[in-house]
Image (cartoon, grey):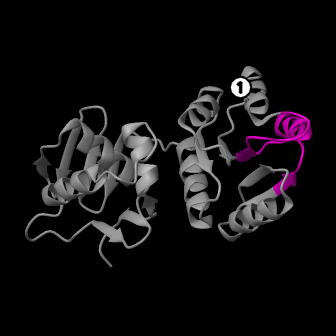
Amino acid sequence: MPRALVIEDDEVTARDIVAELGAHGLAADWVANGREGLERALADGYDIITLDRMLPGMDGIDVVSALRKRNVDTPVLMISALSDVDDRVRGLRAGGDDYLTKPFAPDELAARAEVLLRRRRPSANDTRLRVADLELDLVRHNAERNGEALTLLPTEFRLLEFLMRNAGQVVTRQMIFEHVWGFHFDPGTNVIDVHIGRLRRKIDGAGQAPLIRTVRGSGYVLAPAD
């Protein structure tokens, strides 16, 4: 069972995180102090860490910076009420792998944790992804469906790679925006809908079983038809 370390000073939030991770198969330990969290992260072999930004004893930025200086590569999901772009960028540049702002949906927390865990365990054929009859060659930069080549623009290729790496899992629009475009999601833009629509037309053509599905109110999932 994967192990998670929850570093969070708010008890209610911490218990919610522990419960959500536990419901998705992770055994989670909780500490409420930044300095103690750093000691636990250095001493124990955790698979993922959720780290509050503002902590007693030691700030979250200092915790993740100290981990990276000691070559600890455990994925860190930073969680904070500080939602300004500058705060998010500072957390990521300090060594955080992802950044989630409070308040957050429990399902999104779990989804982001699962993405980080999968990213840490690349498979032997990680340069070639396959879902049903859809294949993506990351070395040759080729895409095929049922043996027929697909012509994808660079952004469409990155979007498809992200969906395929998380096949079977719902990914939110915010997660897509951050991982494919590299900056925070603007709820006023329809750029994701436009690119998903283009990708669907190329992948889920006439006579093909649809692979990309919209999960209303949540995001998108790429998975073989039931």
Which quadrant of the figure has residue 87? top right
Residue 74: percent from the left, percent from the top? 69, 38
Residue for point 86% across, 39% down: 34
Is 34 on the left-hand or right-hand side of 91? right
Establish if 199 lies above or below 66: below
Q: Residues within 10 Å of mark 1 (few under 14, many from 20)?
A: some
Residue 88: percent from the left, percent from the top? 58, 37
Is 92 on the left-hand or right-hand side of 225? right
- Residue beneath disc 1: 68
Residue for point 73% across, 61% down: 17
Q: Is residue 125 visible?
A: no
Residue for point 43% across, 47% down: 185
The amino acid type found where label 1 is placed reads Arg
Establish if 11 lies above or below 9: below
58 or 224, nearer to the observer: 58
Residue 84: percent from the left, percent from the top? 57, 39
Residue 11: percent from the left, percent from the top? 86, 60
Is 217 on the left-hand or right-hand side of 144? right
Specify start and end residues of the magenta stretch as a single range: 29-58
Residue for point 55% across, 59% down: 111
Which quadrant of the figure has residue 221? bottom left
Q: Is residue 77 visible?
A: yes
Q: Magenta stretch: residue 5 in it?
A: no
Establish if 79 lies above or below 73: below
Q: Could you tell me which quadrant the C terminus lies in?
A: bottom left
